[in-house]
Image (tube, rainbow, N blue to C red):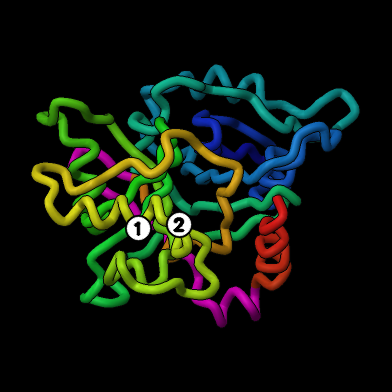
Amino acid sequence: MESHLYLSLIPEALILSQLPPAEFGRYIATGSKRQIEGPAVFIEVDLSADLAAFRIEEALKRCVAHEDGSPRRSVYVAIHNVLGRVPYAAMTCAYLTTPAGVSLPMPPGEWSPKDDREANFLYQELGPVYPRVASRLRPRAFCDAVTDPDAFVSLPAIAFLDLKIGGLAYNPERPEVPGTLYSVSDHIRECFDSLSGKVGRPTKIVNRGLRPDLLFYLVRSGLFVGGGGEMKYFPLPDADTIESDHHLWWHSAQAMKGY
């Protein structure tokens, strides 16, 4: 059986598996006996890339089928300081998996602003730390600031999602915008309002830890991974593509409203 290498972001780990992406997503989101359930975000990694930072060959020898012929679901290669050691060029496709185990593939692409007037962004960090952050920085600038080795506090690498905030992207005083969870929060309004006079990094933590309301239907543009002056972007498909090609995922993502 063919082995696949996956970089899991919730939690951060590098995992070998004989399951293809859709089945692997179902496995890590629901568990083999549905003893656990939760959203998952992972990236497939090219096994032919330079992965000398990890004990890949040793792990591959362990990633063999069971005696009954069933595939090996997981062999953990690394569980600490993983994100910063995987080459960005080796990351081939990202997946958002709902708690029901339905995965959405997101091949890499080039990021561009949807609207030049946008002044505010809301980012959900996915690793190696998990705060939700209000920022006036666009994704690349935010990535560079958080991973700047010359900063007093920094990370070697970071992964994060860009979330929908409706009219708050332009004006924190704008009235509620239907369909965006965060536009009704006084706290998030105050966070964006405070950024206008902030010196240094124009960011503010909204929530310090990963909350259970990591809702994929609120992802605005996609997943970003970067550090060391590099950034890779995995765009969310447009609404028409999701509706026509990924309607089961969208239905499952909408069900997360009650998650």
The crowding category of the residue bearing disc 1, from other C-alpha atoms within 10 Å (few below 14, some 14 to 19, many at least 20), is some
The secondary structure type at the circle numbered 1 is helix
- Which residue sits at x=30%, y=50%? 191
The quadrant where residue 70 appears: top right
Residue 146 at x, y percent in the picture: 24, 39
**Where is residue 38 drawn, in percent x and y?**
68, 42
Residue 1 appears in view: no
**Which residue occupies 74% across, 40% down?**
37
Q: Taking 246 as reference, is 240 left or right?
A: left
219 or 14, nearer to the observer: 219
Amino acid carrying mark 2 in the image: Ser
* Residue denoted by label 2: 185
- Tell me where the magenta segment starts and ends, as one range: 226-245
Q: CA distance from mark 2 to mark 1?
A: 6 Å
Q: Which residue is at 54% across, 31% downward? A: 11
Place of residue 133 in the rendered image (x, y in percent of width and height, measured from the top left)? 35, 46
Question: What residue would you read off at disc 1?
Answer: 189
Magenta span contains residue 236: yes
**What is the crowding at mark 2: few (fewer than 14 residues within 10 Å), some, or many (at least 20)?**
few
Which residue sits furthest right?
68
Is residue 129 magenta-colored?
Answer: no
Q: Position of residue 91 (x, y in %)?
A: 42, 46
Contact? badges 2 and 1 (CB < 8 Å): yes
